Image: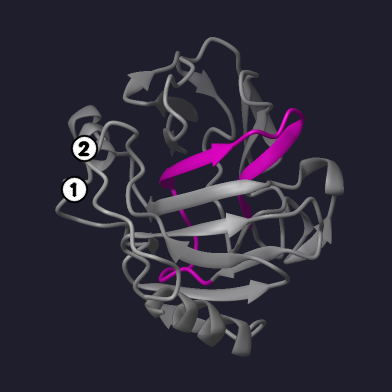
Amino acid sequence: MERLMIVLALLSCRSAAIHRDLTGMMAIFPEDSTDTFAKLLPKKEGPFKALSVCLKFDTDVPGKFSLFSMATPRESDAFVILKKGTSGPFKVVVNDKEQQFNKVPQSPLSWTHLCTTWDSSTGLIQLWVDGQPSVKKMASKGTPIQEKPIIILGQEQDSYGGRFDRDQTFMGHITNLHVWDRVLQPCEVEQVREDQMSQPGNVLNWGALEIEITGNMVLESSLSTNATAHVGPCLPSGE
């Protein structure tokens, strides 16, 4: 019944920003449609001289999809994370400069934990997939991300807040999204992966989020994002 009340409350206020603590919740993108997405309003505005984006996701989409899309009035691809299929490479775009990461570990579990870091002073980008680091590559050295960003989950922005391409639509689940305006240290990445980080994201915080839902995206209890975790007894639907 509690889950039903949450879903009904969200349905009643779609396309209007709401403030939510999404701890223990996941965002479900259940359809291949450009009409379903979530707009997130960050706590800070640019310029950003560094970023760290961490999240958990689960999908079975075989084609390319967007995991994170940050756009500004000046640059639609200000900071974008894309992936090609469940076993394909990742691509990171910063200020329209892109790098592809081919040698990344593949998660044996259904959920994948991903952190992406970027520092404008060196231009270095690095991925951490289930705690394992990628090689470091360079993009947009010396060029901070300017102006006020819009962040979209479920779609990739080709303009500031819109122009979505169905070929990059995400279909699946996302949870535990945090964004910082600095580069996380390796020990911090591990703390985030283990849900033990004492300082949540200061740009986006999954525990204090301003979110605007459009279309058929649903927020639902995630119970557990670890396949080995204990699952309690099930209750009949509606109890």
**Position in image of residue 109 (x %, y %):** 42, 26
Q: How many marks?
A: 2
Taking the image as shown, residue 58 lies to the left or right of residue 72, namely left
Q: Which residues are magenta?
A: 41-70
Looking at the image, residue 120 lies above or below residue 74: above
Looking at the image, residue 123 lies above or below residue 30: above
Is 68 within the magenta? yes
**Position in image of residue 187 (x %, y %):** 18, 31
Q: Can you identify the residue that label 1 sits on?
A: 197
Residue extending furthest top?
A: 103
| Residue 13 appears in the figure | no
**Position in image of residue 58 (x %, y %):** 53, 39
Q: Can you identify the residue that label 2 sits on?
A: 188
Judging depth in this view, the residue of 150 and 88 nearest the camera is 88
Q: Residue at x 44, y 75 (%)?
A: 238
Is there a contact, CB below 8 Å, between mark 2 and mark 1?
yes
Is 220 within the magenta? no
What kind of residue is marked 1? Answer: Met
Taking the image as shown, residue 230 lies to the left or right of residue 52, namely left
Q: Residue at x 58, y 29 (%)?
A: 139
Is the residue marked by circle 1 packed among few (<14), some (14-19), or many (20+) residues within 10 Å?
some
Taking the image as shown, residue 43 lies to the left or right of residue 30, namely left
What kind of residue is marked 2? Answer: Glu
Q: Residue at x 26, y 42 (%)?
A: 192
**Residues under labels 2 and 1: Cα distance?**
7 Å
